[in-house]
Image (cartoon, grey):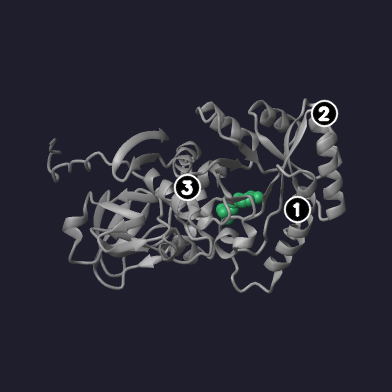
Amino acid sequence: MAEREGSEPVRAACAPVRRVTARVNVAAIERNCTRLRTELRGGAALCAVVKADGYGHGAVQSARAAIDGGASWLAVASAREVSELREAGLRDVPVLVMGALSMAELEEARAADADVVVWSERDVEQLAAAGGGRVHVKLDSGMGRLGTRDPAEASRVAAAAMAAPGVELAGVMTHFATADDLEDDGFFAHQLAAFTSWARGVKEQQPGLLIHAANSAAMLREAEAQFDMVRCGVAIYGMDPFGKNPGARALEPALELSSYVAEVKRCEVGESAGYGRQFVAERDTWLGVLPIGYGDGWRRGLSNNADVLIGGRRYPLVGTVSMDNITVDIGDEAHERVRCERAILIGFQGGERITAEEVARRLDTINYEITCGLTARVPRTYHRDGVLLAQLVGP
Ligand SMILES: *Cc1c(COP(=O)(O)O)cnc(C)c1O
């Protein structure tokens, strides 16, 4: 260790921990899929939704784990996302692109041999002109987003798809607006009824057709919504679609977000930490500085509004979340022990745990946004119940 003249010895940097890591347990994703499949009635297929880079978990690794857990379809939102899966070698599994597609994106989706969603006769004509492909007709039964609200038009689109050269009518679908709200005012049942009567009619003409409607919440709350396939995203990652405790539904969070205590410093009464002095010590204490911030997706709304686990104990995040750092109030007793310690921001440590649901509640948002919001600066590492697989993304 070098020694500066007339000053304290230069302290060694902490052992080689990354500043921030998102560790994803692929075995958890696999088990969540297996677990979800036990809820399926009548042989419905599981389609694993891996859009937005697998809700921040990594699309390719998540897709592989879901397939190992029994998913037989994948779904994404964009053409680029399906290309990524194909380029990574996921060639044989059917992939549905659920989002709206520009002409160029439609070409990309076709090149990737994806199924696409249509809801107008023009969509079908365009696809036929581009050389054809498999389509799923979307009825907007109440989401008010993609799809046609008119069942008669949806039926015409389905007929056009059956007639158009090179086009194959592979499925009919809808999407629920309130499936995650168990106290909804009957709107879920209303959507389900509207879709069921239309979809069954189309299937009479095309018996091989896949009817699908349910997201994670819908498949868990209502077996009647499962039809031939369910499209599960959030639950395969072990997050609760109802925003509650995932463990209560035997779902296992797959992602752990960690950092470490890079610095410990004294903070005397009246001294502050962070931009805007949003924390001023009311007693002498010690602060731990963790190199994670909103640049990593640890959002600024967590300023004075989150806990962190260090050595199996909860400590409050104090002061403002900066782009690259946060500060934690360590108190008086443990400060000597925490320097260089790992810190868990989402995950388990000792008997304590912090879920994405807890973080979401503090930010008045949903668990989806927490994991999706982890930025590209956060390296994802993959393990199978502790056995390291590969580091795929990031520095
Ligand atoms: C994202 C998405 C899903 C998956 O929803 P979860 O709530 O994550 O299970 C299903 N269907 C469509 C159309 C979606 O956009």
Q: Can residue 22 be seen in this view?
A: no
Between 79 and 340, the one nearer to me in the picture? 79
Q: How far apart are marks 2 and 3 (CA)?
A: 43 Å
User: Callout 2, which amino acid?
Assistant: Pro
Figure quadrant of the C terminus? top left
Query: Which of pointers 3 and 1 indicates the residue nearer the eye?
Result: 1
With 10 as the anchor, is 368 left or right in this view? right
Q: In this view, does 392 lie above or below 350?
A: above
For marks 2 and 1, the one nearer the N-term is 2
**Residue ID for mark 3:** 374
Secondary structure found at label 2: loop
Badge 3 amino acid: Leu
Q: What number is the disc on residue 165?
A: 2
Choose top left, top right, bottom left or bottom right for residue 221: bottom right
Residue receiving disc 1: 199
Cα gap from disc 3 to disc 1, whole angstroms: 38 Å
Residue 52 at what x, y percent from top left? 56, 44
| Mark 2, other Cα within 10 Å: few <14 / some 14–19 / many ≥20 | some
Mark positioned earlier in the residue sequence (3 or 1): 1
